[in-house]
Image: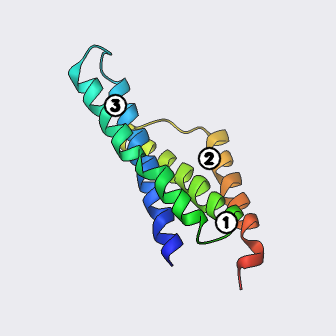
Amino acid sequence: MRSFVLIVIYIISFVGANLSFKKAALFSSTSTQAWVWFALGNAIGFLGPISITLALKQGAASWIFAASIGVGFLVLQGALWFFHHEPMTVFQWAGIGLIVTGLMLMNWGRIG
């Protein structure tokens, strides 16, 4: 259960940091707002490596990495689509489907 919480913290950190970097990229590099969003992204992102390291002490690395990085990527794509209206092609949706399939296969032996 504790590793699940740490994985959720990693995902929130990963998504939050990347959304902050995307926001920073919308401003001129000389803009104060760009630097504030960049600093915020780095501060939020700092929690990611800490939480995944602690999670790896709790469980199997294959499950921890599949859950945190795979689900983190899926949540990030959804957040980019929702907040920044990033277009998604059929091939990108197919790629997301393959990631979900891969996550299920990584955890196949754990189900049941």
Residue at 73% across, 58% down = 102
Determine the CA span between mark 2 and mark 3. Answer: 29 Å
Nearer to us: label 1 or label 2? 1
Question: Which of the two labelled residues, at mark 1 and mark 2, occupies the earlier sequence position?
Answer: 1
Image spot of residue 106 (x, y percent)? 74, 65
Between the residue at mark 1 and the residue at mark 2, the CA separation in whole angstroms equals: 23 Å
Q: Earlier along the polypeptide chain: callout 2 or callout 3?
A: 3
- Image coordinates of residue 112 in percent, x first then y, are 71, 86
SS at circle 3? helix
Q: Earlier in the sequence, mark 1 or mark 3?
A: 3
Q: Is residue 73 left or right of residue 40?
A: right
User: What amino acid is labelled 2 in the image?
Assistant: Trp
The residue at 63%/41% (across/down) is: 92
- Looking at the image, is 14 positioned above or below residue 23? below
| Pointer 2 residue | 93
How many discs mark residues in the rendered view?
Answer: 3
- SS type, badge 1: helix
2 or 3: mark nearer the eye:
3
Q: Which residue is mark 3?
A: 38
